[in-house]
Amino acid sequence: MDSSVIARRLAALREVMRRERLDAFIFPSTDPHNSEYTPDRWKGREWISGFNGSAGTAVVTTDAAALWTDSRYFLAAAEQLSGTEFKLMKLKVPGTPTISEWLGSQLRNRNAQVGVDGMVNAEADVEALIADMRRQGGITVRTNFDPLRDIWTDRPPVPNNKVVIQPMEYAGETVASKITRVRQALREQHADGMLVSALDEVAWLLNLRGSDVHCNPVFVAYVIISPQDVTLYINKEKLTPDVTAYLAAEGVGVREYKEVERGLMDYFAYNILLDPHQTCYTLYNKVDVHEIIRQPSPIAAMKAVKNEAEIRGFRNAMLRDGVALVKFLRWLKPAVEAGGQTEMSVDRKLTSLRAAQPLFKDISFDTIAGYGPHGAIVHYEATPETDAELEPRGFLLLDSGAQYQDGTTDITRTIPLGPLTDEERKVYTLVLKGHIQLELCKFPDGACGTQIDALAREAMWREGMNFLHGTGHGVGSYLNVHEGPHQIRMEYMPAPLHAGMTVTDEPGLYLADRFGVRIENMLIIEPYLSTEFGRFLQMDALTLCPIDTAPIIPSMLLPEEVEWLNSYHRRVWEALSPLLEDAGDREWLKEATRRITT
């Protein structure tokens, strides 16, 4: 984005700040539902800073500006903030101040006031900010003002796309059953009801889907569960007659989206469960009950464990996705050798092949097609300005996924387009070793992702190498591609792992200005065995797509790693070859899944 545009927006913001007597304003990445990916209306941080990554916080004072983001976006943010006032603050890097510390150093006036929009900041985050600001010389925090209402003149409206019903053959459980289970979980917390804020939780609970958020089949709404009622708060224009009748038959009341504040004020029970990390500050403070139970939403853990219909849907979706990927991979190298292919053109090609598959709805996130040095930018997204032409040498890192009505996919393959260096081959093999070791893992039921994360990193650590992003995340059933509460990562994530959960396995290594390697499959957690020491679990690959063997240094692989790779490729061949009508596709797949030896 033109830096002069950002300069004009900052000037307009500061004029409003002076009028409101605000010394700083903080723009998070979230919306009123604390979403990871937000509808365009709430992309205020992107609008004010020009940085479009999914995670980051922009802070503006009367004479300075800074943006905090994590390691996934260091390189991308540096490029996008170049020429603007914004200084890049690298999270978790020694020497980087926290937002509160930075504001304390910038606002030396003890009567300073910092603004946040209470509708797009979680209650827990605002309370932490208030405490931190108090320690920074008594700075106060104001939560009832949104400056974007005055300065973002062409701000998009709240989306009004139609909602659709997710059929039982894919959902696998009725709304009545889900509500009964949620109420049972609430009783175990001694809670009378709850506010459901997260959009994917609303969609899952009601077996509905939407298209309000790019790549995520969700819709903007809240649900209030009380001892007697379940009420959906949504712009009624979004409801077709069929959906309206469906909700009535399920016993779900409907009120307008903007009436949720009144719904919370009118909530009549002794207590209510509010997740302080999901519920925005403004709505949290609209509740007037004897007790607020500050606990995580029980829906996240329920949604994470897939039922038989959802697991069947994932497996069927992976077959279709695998067919599209085989066609793409067969096409890719000859097309690159012929010339004229770029990062964006191969993205379009892959998307078109997926779109030809039954039940395809959309991509599940913006494709990461990073060639050469761009592969070292963890969440790189090609633009017309950065779109690199592919050459028949080096690596293409391709991270992509699709939304099918019966399942969501997420896969990364690092593809050699021609000759490789010894360094590229070594790094590729290290990443593959980490990927395989995690897939081979056996662990107790209830272990957390942090306890098994080291398995994906140990071979890298021996070489003094590491990656800073997570190793795995849950994936929704035709829902968000990033789904919690469980994760596999170095940082402590206590959410337990159970059979029925989906999780990705995606270690990587990134050598700045040279290349990057990531290899990712989606997995399903399954029972392994039960002994006197308890129940143990294992993971089975859902993804069906060859892993390129050309870059491998076979002598670096352990016998069990070679056995796993050959077994996986045999399974890919057996599953996909009957579905490939083109003899050339089958021949390509046969060669791509050929056994390797050390």
Image: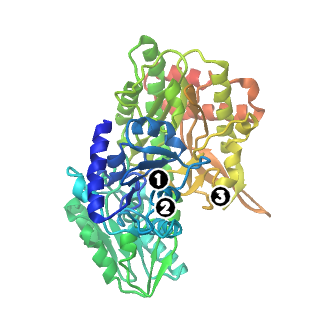
Which one is nearer the viewer's eye here, 109 or 474?
109
> Callout 2: few (<14), some (14-19), or many (20+) C-alpha neighbours within 10 Å?
many
Which residue is pictured at 32% across the width and 47% down the height?
47
The quadrant in which the C terminus is found is top right
- Describe residue 163's horizontal placement relative to residue 78 as left or right: left
Q: Tell whether label 2 touches label 1 (CB within 8 Å).
A: yes
Tell whether label 1 touches label 3 (CB within 8 Å): no
Circle on res. 101:
none
| Residue named by callout 2 | 303
Which numbered disc flags the more N-terminal residue, 3 or 2?
2
Q: Which mark is residue 476?
A: 1
Residue 494 at what x, y percent from top left?
63, 61
The image quarter in which residue 226 lies: bottom left
- Please, which colouring scheme is shown? rainbow
Q: Nearer the viewer, mark 3 or mark 2?
A: 3
Most distant residue in the top direction: 338
**Residue shown at the point (34%, 28%) measured from the top left:** 384
Residue 549 seen from this side: yes
Mark earlier in primary sequence (1, 2):
2
**Residue at the farthest front position:** 109
The circle on residue 448 is: 3
Residue at the spot 33% in from the left edge and 37% down from the top edge: 3
Q: Is residue 551 above or below residue 1?
A: above
Three-letter amino acid code at the position of disc 3: Cys
User: Which of pointers 3 and 1 indicates the residue nearer the eye?
Assistant: 3
Can the viewer see residue 577 in this picture?
no
Residue type at the position of mark 1 = Gly
